[in-house]
Amino acid sequence: MDLKYKVTDDKYATAKEVLRNEFNVSARLYQKLKKNKQIYINRNNNFYNDSLCLNDTLEVDLGFDEKSENILPKKMNLNILYEDKYMLIINKEPNIPVHPSMEHFEDSLSNGVKYYFDTINLHRKIRIVNRLDKDTSGIVIFAKCEYVQEALINQMKNNLFKKEYLGILNRYFKRKIWNN
């Protein structure tokens, strides 16, 4: 299980309250988790309401299958810097768009990630956390579940997510354009 909460007081009456307040789960994601029977109270996911009692254990499995039919798989060499159960971090080369568009419907980084997910039998939506321009190289993060994508995007909005950029020039500027 990915999220776990033990009821030790009467602070929350429902699983929905716990997930919203303790884990910042959105209402939309809560509905998906409930629909896909990914919420467990005392290891049971066949409950009719989500009321909690003292000593109940609430658990959530974030790893349910999702379809990503709008992105066609395309074999490409991915420079994977890091991967775990929750995210895939790729070093994107320049001249590759991050997501499909009318001009790049089959040759985006997302198409390559879809192919990779298919080859490892991972049935997830392609969830981009950050974007880079087509001509820009750098790190692109793909979340493997909606919860992680939401959490990382919230960190970016609250300036808790640190990004650093390095520019490389192939010629000199004629004049200084920055201050130290």
Image: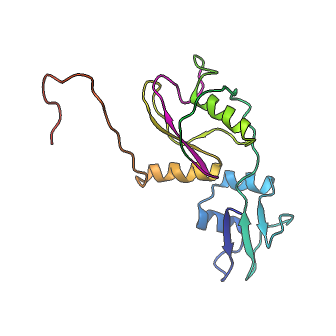
| Relative height, residue 153 to residue 7 (above, below) | above
Q: How many marks?
A: 0
Tell whether position 96 is magenta: yes
How far from the left and from the top, in percent, is residue 169? Answer: 27, 27
Was residue 21 drawn as part of the magenta stretch in this picture?
Answer: no
- x, y percentage for residue 35? 80, 53
Secondary structure mostly seen in the magenta stretch: loop
Q: Quadrant of residue 173?
A: top left
Report the magenta residues as a range.
Answer: 83-101
Q: Left of 68 or right of it: where is 152?
A: left
Residue shown at 59%/67% (left/top)? 22
Q: Residue at x 77, y 58 (%)?
A: 38
Give the x, y percent position of residue 137: 43, 31
Q: Residue furthest top?
A: 103
Q: Nearer the viewer, residue 46 or 118?
A: 118
* Quarter in which the N terminus is drawn: bottom right
Front-lying residue, 108 or 15: 108
